[in-house]
Image (cartoon, grey):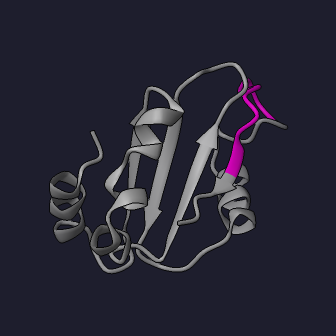
Amino acid sequence: PLNAKWLGLLHKHTTKDGLIVANTVNSKMLRESAYLNNKRTATYFKSAFQLTVPQLENIVAAFLKNESTSNVLRNNIRQTPGLNHRSGPNKLSVHIRNISL
């Protein structure tokens, strides 16, 4: 689970420009995360996003130490070989939403 102890430990071992990416099995797990339920943990990150793919039930959470937007993240995904759903064999369309407190 994404509890305060785990996110705190990951935060300590992440660079100042780093990010943490976590796969959750469903939206409930993300809703119960320390990021959304612990004010101190939330202060570790300037931005957070939820990434989903319509074909799958799991949710990927991205916690960034720097401020960003979903458009910036979307553009970075498009520029990464193998992740751009408009070119190559990958036909997964990633949906990105800002996680707000």
Compared to residue 9, the image places residue 44 above or below, namely below
Residue extending farthest right: 86
The total number of labels drawn is 0
Q: Is residue 42 left or right of residue 93?
A: left
Q: Is residue 43 left or right of residue 54?
A: left
Compared to residue 89, the image places residue 17 above or below, namely below
Q: In this view, does 25 lie to the left or right of 96?
A: left
**Residue 91 magenta-highlighted:** yes
- Percent coordinates x, y for residue 79 in the rendering: 70, 55
Magenta span = 87-96
Quarter assignment of residue 14? bottom left
The one nearer the camera, 14 or 41, is 41
Compared to residue 79, the image places residue 91 above or below, namely above
- Percent coordinates x, y for residue 97 in the rendering: 68, 53
Quarter assignment of residue 100? bottom right
Q: Main secondary structure of the magenta part?
A: loop
- Percent coordinates x, y for residue 70 in the rendering: 70, 63
Q: Residue at image x 39%, y 77%?
A: 17
- Percent coordinates x, y for residue 87 in the rendering: 81, 36
Q: Residue at image x 36%, y 49%?
A: 33
Compared to residue 56, the image places residue 8 above or below, namely below
The one nearer the camera, 68 or 8, is 8
Q: Residue at image x 43%, y 58%?
A: 36
Q: In this view, does 77 lie to the left or right of 45?
A: right
Q: Residue at image x 41%, y 36%?
A: 29
Q: The N terminus is located in which quarter? A: top left
